[in-house]
Structure formats: C-alpha cells, structure tokens
Image: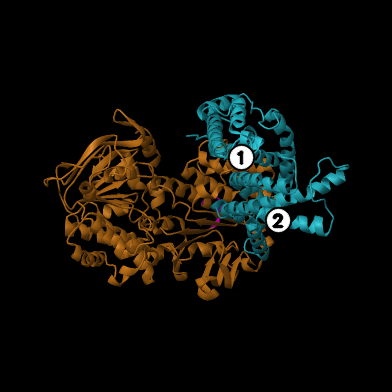
C-alpha cells in the first residue's frame, strides 16, 4: 500500500504552562490525506485547528513547540527538518492562505512585488515570468483588470479582492499542498460566496491537495472531501463530508450541527395593531460638520421604523452599511443630522447636546466586545451596582440584593460577584455586559453584534437569554448583526440595510417572498447552507443580481 | 507625490514655525526672569545707583518689557540677534564661529551613533530574549541612567589623568590631524555613549512591534530568509517610528553637548551660552537658546516629514 500524501501521527504541541511545565494545546492528532483531496479542520476558537494546519509547514507560533509525533508531507517529516530545509519548502511546495489578507500583505510594497516574491526567494522563475503567471492567476480568480491590479498597494484594493490576490500568491509556485486558514471569515457574506467560488474553481483546476481550516460547517461542506472535527486540541471525529453531515458519530459534532441549524425562538406574531413603544422617523446621520440637516459625509439616510413593546427588530447589512452608526445615534453617542425618536410618545432627542439622565436611562446599549466594554479593574458586583447607583434605581439597601438577582437572571453564579471580567469566559463576559445594560431598566435595548465574537454554541445561549428578557420585561430591542441566521432566529421584524438605507423591512419568514430589494435577495442567497452542492446552485443567477444591486 | 502630501508637509512646517514663535516668546520671558541684568553684572556690586541707571538706559534695558519683546522679535525675524551687551559685537558673529564647532561635534557623534545604534537595535530585536539581547538591554539601561557628567569625569580621570593617553581638554587648533582626533576622542565617545543606548532601545522596540504583525508571519511562511524578513519586510515599516526615536535621541545629544563642552572646554555654542548666562549677556543667551530649540524642532520636523513621505497610504491616497 502506498503512503498517503499527508500523514500526521500522534502529534502533540505544547505551550509553557504553570511552573514552566509544558502544557499541551494539541494532542493525539492522527490524520491522513490523499493527493488531490481537500481536508477540512473544523472547530471553535482555541480548538487548535490553525496550530495543526501550521504544523504541516513545520511552523509553530511563538511559544509553541512540537513535543511528540510526526507530520509527514509527501514522504518528508516536516518536524525533522532544519530551519533552512523547512524554509525551502514554505511558499514553494507548501503554501499558506491566511485569514486576513488585509493584515497579511505588507503595507509598504506593491502587491505584485509581494505576490511574485516567493518565485524570487526560491528561484523558481524570473521576474517577468512570475509576473505573467501572477496575472494569469488574477484572471483565473476573477479579479478585475488583472494586468494592472498588481501595481496597486494593499490599501488600494478591497477586502474580497485582496483575499483572492493572496490566493494567487500562494498558487504562484504550484504548491503540492495549500493550507487555507479561515480564508473567508473576515469577508461580508455577499463577498464570501464570490471568493469561495473562485477558490473552489482554483482547487479543482490545479488538482490541488488542500487543508481548509474553518469554524463554519456550511462553508466547509462546500469545499471539503473530508472533515476533521476538533475540540480543545483533540480530534473528535474524521469522516467523509457527506457522511459526517448526515450521520455524525461524535456528540460534539451533533452539537455543532444543531447550533448551525437555525433554531427559531418564540416570536411575538403580528404587532401592527399594538401601539409602538419606540418610533423613529426620518433619521439621517453622518460624519463631519452638519449643515442644513446634512452631514458632510452622510452615512445613514431617511431611516424610519417602529418597535412594539417586547418586540425585537433586527438590522442586517454588510460592513460599512451604517448599522453601527444607526445604533450610536439612537444611543445618543453620535448626533443625528436630522430626524427624531420618541419613546412612549416622548421625544428623546437625537440631535444636539447631551440627553438628560432619564432619557439616557431609557435607551441602553450592549456593545459587541464585552472585553473592552467592561472595566477590567472592577468586580462583577461593582459593574452591575454602578448603573443602579448612577440612575438611582430602587432602595439603597436593596441594591446589593438586586445585583444578585441580575446575576441569576443572566445565569452567572452568585459566587462570581467578587471576580473581575478577566477571570470570566467570553460568553460569561457577554452575559455580564447584558446584565449591566438591563440593570438600568431601559425601555429600549440596542444590541450591536453581541454574538459576533462568540462561538456558535455560546452565542446560541446568549440569544436564548435575550429572548427570555423580552418576554419577562417587555423590553423593546434593536438587534444589529451581519448574520442573517442569527437575526432570523430571534427577530420579529428584520430591516435590511444597504449603503445607509433600509431596502427591505419584513418578518424573517417573508424575507424570501418577492417583491424584495435585489440586495436582500442577493444577501439571502449568499448565506452558506449545510448541504454540499449549495455553492454551485447559489451561483446560478448571481451575476444578474449583482448587476441589479450595483444599479441601486 | 500628490497635492495631499504637499499640504500635509506644508502644514507640518507651519506648525514648526508656530512652535518656534511660541518658544521664542517663552525664551524672552524666561531670560527676563533671570535675577540681575548686564548693567549690574558688568559694573560690579560697588557701583552707584546712578551709574547702573545710566548704563541701563544706554543698553535700552529701561524700556518696558513688551516694547523690548517686539523690537527683539522684529530683529530676530530679519536674522539680527542683536548686539552682545558685554563685548558689543553682533551676537550672530559670535554664534556662527561657535556653531560650526558644535555642529562638527554633533555630526561626528551622529555619524558614529546611528550605525552603532541600528546594529545593536536590529540584532537584539532579531535575537530577542537571547543572552545577547538581555546583555544589551541591561547595559543600555545602565548607560541611560548614568549621568553624562559622571561618565565624562570618569573617562577623563582614567584616560587623561591616570593613563595620560589623551588630552583632558579639547584643542581644535591641534598641530596634526592625529592630535585633533586624540583630543576629540573623549568628547565624542561620551556623546555617543549617551545617544546610542537610548536610540538602540527605541529601535529594538519599534522593530519588535513590527515583527509581530501578520505580514511578517506571512513572509516567514513564504520561505523568506531571516535577513529578508527583517531587512526587507520589517524595516521599511519600522522606519517611521525608528526615525522619530532617532530624532528624539539626537535631541538628548543637545543636552549632552552642554556637559561635554564644559567639561572638555570645547569652544561650542553650549559653552558660549553658559558663559553668556554668567555675564548676564541676555541677547546672547536668547540667541543660543533659539539655536538649541530650533535644532530640536528641525530634527523632529524632518522625522515627521519622512514618516509622511514613506507612508504609501498618504503618498498614494485612496484609489476608490
């Protein structure tokens, strides 16, 4: 029997732990991959998937070291090689496509010089040959103006284009093995589908052997022949893609699959007959000086909507669509150039100077990054007590008890009251962040990408909590996200934002019903689905939609 | 080059002149706070009140401060720093001779210090955490915290007094080039010692923060050699912070020059300024202070302009 192209045996990678004793972050890894196949490594943050992928290049990040096992690529154990020998393989026989092309291109040089650099390093081609090859790859990856786009600097090219250009960089020396490390995670969903398509075509055309690292099962289902599921640095299950998705054997895989399926929460139903709690009319905002009710750089245009008591209204859109600016205006952090908002009929004031304390209390914001929103020097008790004291809520003697009630509400053990945010997990921090906002007893809660930084399973529990809160307190919520699945799962109404305007407003189940804006249609079709073959189907009719969106 | 970058550079230069004006005003105020004036200083403590008053009005010291400020400022803009109160010579003439001496000392120091600091900073960043790195870091902290006058006195004691190898005083009219070099060796060494430690530490820090970027990991994974990673990928991006820290370190040279010129009796601007303070020769003090402040501002401005030019974002603007 011939050797597989890639064979990882009993791999262990350690970091220095307490007392200088090495602590394994990855252990007992056994993987094989045949030539011309795509293997996916899937898991949540900290599962060790990138660490394993990088070991195939004989590379360990600062602090990590290989302590056991072997990583044999095409007959060579990468871990036995000297630095010089590994260097000759990197960028030549084995190539890497990183998560963020924007951060991985050197800002000081033209793209073409960086893309052809590996040919110069390894002496595989002359400079003009390499440049010609790069241009051919640009064309193959569907980049606009392939003959000249390389002359630009990284900051002059969009994120989706950069990601394709870094793929061209990886392909330059015709590598035998390509490692793709979350290559589309930083992109908007409508851009992701284009890039995925380009990557898949490239892998097929070159009969490349590839390792695809991702946290997103639906994306992986489109790309991989075989999936390896990882958790806390250990292998849970390896199986052929179709089989793993239809009949997972490990409990953790089932959990992942369940979290990926949209899990509908209880909805309010029709709210059109209820008197709205929050009314926003004709809101315009932007940056720079405000003249004649218009900002120098307008971002949000003519936004109007209502929220009923206990209703969750979702806002969805890509980065730069104005979602966060909208939330900041409603929170009173950023002045509107025009428009007004009323809560229970009372004008809350969107323009001009500071709001009164009562009005600020009525609208509370939950920020995306609990890490930066919570003061790391304060204990959980201090953090939750602060809004009670600041807004003078309830009897002074009852406030400590109220803090514990709030902790119960967000399911943080009371014993954690004396701890500081740094000692909590990501999901717990986000719960505290939520409790802090709820402590002020607001009427409207603004949630800005509150689950985006969390892993799927943790995010799901935070969503459950949000749904409980609205049922219990009749809180109105504006839920901002870039993820259609999340928004559909908990929102009663969804507003789709594109270039600062609301292009579609509908209940989630009606978003697919025409007539909707072409952007909304494109957005919905771009959301990856678990079934293999979705990518090819979704691409049908996409070009026409893209043109329609460009005309918007 | 585009319009935006020209605008930024012009703005930066504008800021420099504004700062210079503020500094000039502060210097004027500060020099007027010095106790006593040239009249009392040159006549001695036994002069009568009348003779002091007479000399004061002859020197124009009896005019109101605001008026003196404006006439001083107006003359300064035209390049006239006034007449020395003590030897009645134009201040500019005295300055120019001394300035070339100080510039010679500073240029010599810079020419030696920059390559040395670059070498130390870059090598310790590459071998970060090694024994070499810790040794260099430790000694540079030691060097930075040792006062320059102590270093100067110590080496004079060892090399001039004890061993007798080098002259204790700097003599610029030495008979031969060898003698000139021998007499400059100690002053230059002291200054290099002060500047290199600070500069090397800042270069190391700037380079290390650049070496942690994603594009450096990417270049490693492209198979680049270590030299290529540091010199081609990290250096251009670390250049702006390095230049800024170099400018700051060179500014500490300006304060070091005062001690060195005094201790080695070197005929430079700093020496001139100290002498002028002791004779209460206010126009000369003001002119010397302006020289020091302008050189500081010019260095910082050059570093900033360089940072603007080397940034491709600013150089090319946004394409879309």
Give B61 or B229, whichever is nearer the viewer: B61
Query: Which structural element holds mark 2?
Result: helix
Q: CA distance from mark 2 to mark 1?
A: 24 Å
- Which region shows up in magenta? A204-209
**Closer to viewer: mark 2 or mark 1:** 2
Please check the rendered image and state whether residue B140 is part of the magenta-colored stretch, yes or no. Answer: no
**Chain ID of residue with mark 2:** B
State which quadrant residue A336 falls in.
Answer: top left
Q: Position of residue A423 (x, y in %)?
A: 39, 67
Please check the rendered image and state whether residue A207 is part of the magenta-colored stretch, yes or no. Answer: yes
Dot 2 or dot 1, earlier in sequence: 2
Give B270 or A453, whichever is nearer the viewer: B270
Q: Badge 2 is on which residue? A: B151
How many numbered marks have been drawn onto this rendered protein structure?
2
Query: Colour in which chain B is shown?
Result: cyan
Q: Position of residue A400 (x, y in %)?
A: 23, 66
Q: Badge 1 is on which residue? A: B296
Query: Colour in which chain A is shown?
Result: orange
Query: Which structural element holds mark 1?
Result: helix
Colour style of the rendered protein structure = by chain
């Amino acid at each position: 029997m011939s050797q597989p192209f890639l064979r990882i045996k009993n791999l262990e990678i350690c970091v220095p732990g307490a007392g200088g004793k090495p602590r394994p972050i990855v252990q007992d890894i056994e993987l094989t991959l045949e030539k011309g196949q795509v293997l996916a490594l899937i898991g949540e943050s900290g599962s060790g998937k990138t660490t394993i992928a990088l070991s195939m290049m004989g590379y360990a990040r600062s602090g990590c070291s290989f302590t056991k096992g072997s990583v044999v690529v095409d007959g060579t154990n990468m871990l036995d090689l000297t630095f010089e020998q590994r260097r000759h393989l990197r960028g030549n026989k084995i190539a890497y496509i990183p998560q963020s092309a924007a951060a991985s291109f050197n800002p000081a040089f033209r793209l073409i010089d960086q893309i052809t650099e590996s040919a110069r390093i390894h002496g595989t081609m002359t400079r003009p040959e390499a440049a010609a090859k790069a241009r051919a790859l640009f064309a193959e990856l569907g980049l606009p103006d392939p003959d000249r786009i390389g002359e630009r600097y990284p900051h002059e090219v969009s994120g989706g284009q950069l990601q394709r250009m870094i793929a061209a960089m990886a392909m330059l020396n015709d590598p035998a093995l390509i490692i793709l490390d979350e290559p589309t995670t930083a992109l908007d969903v409508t851009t992701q589908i284009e890039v995925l398509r380009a990557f898949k075509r490239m892998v097929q055309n070159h009969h490349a052997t590839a390792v695809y690292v991702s946290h997103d099962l639906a994306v992986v289902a489109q790309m991989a022949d075989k999936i390896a599921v990882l958790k806390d640095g250990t292998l849970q299950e390896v199986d052929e893609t179709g089989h793993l998705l239809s009949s997972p054997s490990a409990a953790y895989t089932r959990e992942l699959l369940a979290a990926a399926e949209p899990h509908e929460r209880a909805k309010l139903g029709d709210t059109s007959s209820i008197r709205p709690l929050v009314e926003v009319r004709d809101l315009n905002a932007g940056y720079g000086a405000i003249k004649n009710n218009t900002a120098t750089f307008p971002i949000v245009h003519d936004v109007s909507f209502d929220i009923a008591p206990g209703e969750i209204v979702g806002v969805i859109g890509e980065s730069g669509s104005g979602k966060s600016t909208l939330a900041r205006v409603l929170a009173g952090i950023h002045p509107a150039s025009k428009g007004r908002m009323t809560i229970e009929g009372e004008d809350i004031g969107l323009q001009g100077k500071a709001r009164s304390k009562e009005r600020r209390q009525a609208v509370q914001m939950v920020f995306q990054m609990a890490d930066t929103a919570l003061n790391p020097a304060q204990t959980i008790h201090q953090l939750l007590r602060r809004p009670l004291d600041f807004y003078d809520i309830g009897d002074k003697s009852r406030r400590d008890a109220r803090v514990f009630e709030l902790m119960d509400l967000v399911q943080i053990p009371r014993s954690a009251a004396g701890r500081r945010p740094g000692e909590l997990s990501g999901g717990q921090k986000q719960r505290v962040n939520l409790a802090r906002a709820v402590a002020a007893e607001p009427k409207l809660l603004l949630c800005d990408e509150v689950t985006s930084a969390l892993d799927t399973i943790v995010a799901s529990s935070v969503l459950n909590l949000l749904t409980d809160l609205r049922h219990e307190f009749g809180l109105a919520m504006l839920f901002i996200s870039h993820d259609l699945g999340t928004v559909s799962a908990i929102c009663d109404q969804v507003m789709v934002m594109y270039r600062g305007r609301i292009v579609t407003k509908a209940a989630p189940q009606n978003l697919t019903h025409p007539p909707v804006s072409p952007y909304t249609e494109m957005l919905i079709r771009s959301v990856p689905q678990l079934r293999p073959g979705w990518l090819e189907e979704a691409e049908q009719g996409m070009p026409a939609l893209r043109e329609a969106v460009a005309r918007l | 080059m585009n319009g935006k970058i020209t605008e930024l550079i012009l703005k930066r230069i504008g800021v420099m002149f504004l700062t210079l004006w503020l500094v000039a005003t502060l210097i004027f105020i500060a020099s007027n706070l010095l106790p006593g004036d040239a009249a009392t200083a040159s006549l001695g403590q036994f002069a009568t009140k009348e003779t002091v008053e007479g000399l004061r009005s002859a020197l124009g010291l009896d005019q109101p401060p605001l008026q003196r400020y404006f006439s001083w400022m107006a003359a300064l803009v035209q390049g006239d720093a006034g007449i020395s109160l003590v030897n009645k010579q134009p201040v500019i003439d005295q300055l120019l001779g001394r300035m070339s001496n100080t510039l010679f000392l500073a240029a010599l120091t810079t020419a030696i210090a920059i390559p040395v600091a670059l070498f130390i900073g870059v090598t310790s960043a590459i071998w970060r955490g090694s024994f070499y790195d810790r040794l260099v870091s430790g000694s540079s902290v030691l060097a930075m915290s040792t006062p320059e006058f102590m270093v100067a006195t110590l080496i004079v004691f060892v090399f001039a007094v004890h061993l007798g190898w080098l002259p204790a005083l700097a003599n610029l009219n030495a008979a031969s080039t060898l003698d000139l070099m021998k007499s400059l060796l100690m002053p230059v060494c002291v200054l290099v010692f002060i500047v290199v430690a600070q500069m090397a530490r800042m270069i190391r820090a700037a380079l290390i923060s650049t070496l942690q970027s994603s594009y450096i990991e990417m270049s490693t994974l492209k198979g680049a050699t270590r030299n290529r990673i540091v010199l081609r990928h990290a250096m251009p991006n670390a250049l702006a912070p390095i230049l800024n820290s170099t400018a700051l370190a060179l500014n500490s040279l300006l304060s070091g020059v005062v001690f060195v010129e005094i201790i080695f009796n070197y005929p430079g601007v700093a020496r001139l300024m100290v002498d002028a303070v002791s004779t209460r020769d206010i126009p000369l003090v003001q002119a010397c202070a302006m020289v020091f402040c302008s050189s500081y501002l010019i260095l910082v401005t050059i570093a900033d302009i360089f940072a603007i030019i080397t940034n491709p974002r600013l150089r090319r603007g946004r394409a879309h």
